[in-house]
């Protein structure tokens, strides 16, 4: 079982215009759609599509519109009551693909509400294989909240604690790594990995998998046992203390990249709970991410829509010294 935590959830509301957005004018929409959003929710959604038992935890009242949206999807959930309402993020889309985003501030969590969220996660983690901490943090909690939460789980469960995967960025991730609290996996994208490691920039990392692997090596030194870094359409890299891998997806007609990285993390977790090798887990991660990108909107793939056997796995150098060549290359059949 996997527990996901979305500490700062949002209702994602898409507003479709039939023409370019014009400031100061009344404009009529061709349609609108609302969906429960947040990285942890996206991971739970992808896991459920593959029939893996999971529990989505988030701060919201039982009668919040966000809670109703999650319930309507059939996700197994544990809302932790707060006084404030879950924020709404608006995306105004135009026919040429231009998207304008307007994000509301989230609710302010009191100390008591933050403590209740921690207690709920600790209680739910007793039977979990993985604990996934995903996304930004709400107002009212310190940037060290993820470290506090992990330490609370480990203080309660000790050696029976679940493995921890973190998909966050900026201050929450920096504070976690600075705390000395080790996690089993972090899942940055190329730009987040560049910020984290101080190596080059995101575009350069997407174009150079060996450099991305070297950047991931620096992240290992800061407190992660493994790094799964998505590199956009180029694929993804996996790095741990002894293994450095680059995965290339099969040719994909991209329809939407919304949530593709979250599906990649879900694919990795799906393989991990079966005891898969790093090669197989990375192949499943990239298969899930590329399949998600081929679907409209924020759709998540079914197992039948993923093709891990078509993902190419290359073994990279693990010296930490950048090379433009791949040290050794193997075609992984993920068998």
Image: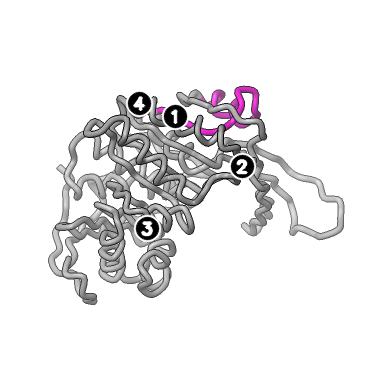
Question: Sequence order check: which comes first, mark 1 or mark 3?
Answer: 1
Q: Residue at x 69, y 40 (%)?
A: 32
Mark 2 and mark 4 in contact (Cβ < 8 Å)?
Answer: no
The image shows residue 188 at horizontal and vertical percentages of: 39, 56
Q: Callout 4 environment at 10 Å: few (<14), some (14 to 19), or many (20+)?
A: some
Question: Magenta segment range?
Answer: 55-73
Q: Nearer the viewer, mark 4 or mark 1?
A: 1
Q: Callout 3 environment at 10 Å: few (<14), some (14 to 19), or many (20+)?
A: some
Quadrant of the rendering where the C terminus is positioned: top left
Res. 243 image quadrant: bottom left
Q: Is residue 59 magenta?
A: yes
Q: Nearer the viewer, residue 92 or 107?
A: 107
Q: Residue at x 54, y 28 (%)?
A: 80
- The Cα atoms of the two marked residues, 2 and 1, are separated by 27 Å
Q: Residue at x 46, y 39 (%)?
A: 40
Residue under circle 3?
178
Residue under circle 4?
53
Q: Say which element carries label 4.
A: loop
The image shows residue 137 at horizontal and vertical percentages of: 53, 46
Left or right side of 200 for 271: left
Figure check: 4 above or below 250: above
Residue under circle 1?
119
Res. 277 image quadrant: top left
């Amino acid at each position: 079982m996997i527990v996901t935590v979305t500490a700062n959830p949002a209702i994602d509301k898409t507003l479709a215009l039939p023409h370019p957005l014009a400031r100061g004018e009344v404009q009529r929409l061709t349609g609108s759609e609302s969906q429960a959003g947040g990285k942890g929710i996206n991971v739970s959604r992808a896991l459920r599509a593959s029939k893996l038992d999971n529990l989505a935890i988030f701060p919201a009242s039982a009668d919040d519109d966000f809670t109703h949206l999650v319930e309507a999807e059939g996700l197994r959930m544990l809302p932790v009551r707060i006084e404030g309402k879950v924020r709404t993020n608006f995306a105004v889309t135009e026919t040429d693909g231009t998207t304008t985003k307007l994000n509301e501030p989230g609710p302010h969590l009191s100390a008591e509400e933050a403590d209740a969220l921690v207690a709920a996660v600790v209680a739910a983690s007793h039977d979990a294989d993985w604990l996934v901490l995903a996304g930004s943090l709400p107002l009212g909690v310190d940037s060290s909240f993820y470290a506090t939460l992990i330490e609370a789980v480990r203080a309660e469960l000790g050696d029976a604690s679940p493995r921890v995967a973190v998909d966050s960025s900026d201050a929450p991730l920096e504070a976690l790594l600075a705390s000395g609290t080790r996690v089993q996996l972090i899942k940055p994208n190329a730009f987040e990995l560049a910020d984290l490691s101080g190596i080059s920039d995101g575009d350069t990392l997407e174009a150079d998998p060996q450099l991305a692997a070297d950047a991931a090596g620096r992240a290992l030194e800061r407190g992660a046992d493994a790094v799964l870094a998505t590199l956009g359409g180029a694929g993804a890299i996996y790095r741990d203390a002894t293994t450095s891998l680059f995965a290339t997806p099969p040719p994909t007609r991209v329809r939407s990249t919304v949530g593709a990285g979250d599906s990649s993390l879900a694919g990795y977790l799906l393989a991990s709970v079966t005891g898969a090798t790093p090669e197989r887990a990375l192949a499943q991660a990239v298969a899930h991410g590329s399949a998600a990108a081929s679907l409209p909107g924020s759709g998540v793939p079914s197992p039948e829509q993923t093709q891990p056997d078509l993902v190419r796995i290359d073994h990279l150098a693990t010296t930490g010294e950048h090379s433009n060549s791949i040290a050794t290359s193997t075609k992984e059949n993920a068998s």
